[in-house]
Amino acid sequence: YDKGWKEAIDCIVSLQKNGYKECNLILAGDGEMLEEFKNKFPSNKYPFISFLGFVSDVLHQINCCDVILLPTYHQEQLPTFIIEGLFLGKPVIATDIAEIKSMITYNNEPAGTTIPLVNGKPDVKKMYDAMLELTTDKTKRKNCSEVAFNAYKKFDYDTFINQYENVFSRLIAENKIS
């Protein structure tokens, strides 16, 4: 499953076993592996893992979280989940693929942590370390949250429109389009 759910679950189970009981994992979305994961990690044995399935109000779910996690290894160029998290000022832990690193960066400061892929999958050790750090270091989490709000500005509608107008104005001035 290319969303990295298995790796995220491995990390949260390890965090729980190591005494970080305040850590919970909320997995939203449906897909071919949802039922398999629900059966393998039942809520009576893993109460710190929630499988929501399809969610129509994603912003509400994101807003309930301290940190967002996208351990995908699917080549998503500009994942809207990241943009939604930034909009709400949420620190981000995500795989370092496509444009995610630039999406979560503002003035060379990251709004969280990107984790590398190892053999095509998220590096579980680095993901664990990032989850632990953003769980236990409230100052870091607060700083990442502030960066997230600023990083979101790149995706603001008015900013997008201005950028498109600038590109088209430049192309017209260079006689590349008429």
Image (tube, grey):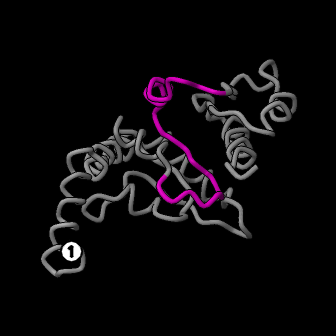
Figure quadrant of residue 176: bottom left
Q: Is residue 99 above or below residue 84?
A: below
Q: Which residue is mark 1?
A: 171
Q: Which of the pair 112/3 is nearer the observer? A: 3
Q: Position of residue 146 (x, y in %)?
A: 28, 44
Left/right placement of residue 176 relative to residue 61 reads left
Bounds of the magenta segment = 54-78
Does the magenta portion include 57? yes
Identity, as a three-letter code, of the amino acid under mark 1: Leu
Instruction: Give the percent coordinates (x, y) of residue 137.
Output: 43, 43
Prevalent SS, magenta region: loop
Pick whichever, 139 or 121, lies toward us: 121
On the picture, is 106 further left or further right than 25? left
* Horizontal arrangement in the rendering, residue 128 relative to residue 114 (left or right): right
Position of the C terminus by quadrant:
bottom left
Q: Does the magenta segment cover residue 175?
A: no
Determine whether the residue tagged by mark 1 lies in a helix, strand or loop.
helix
- Tag count in the figure? 1
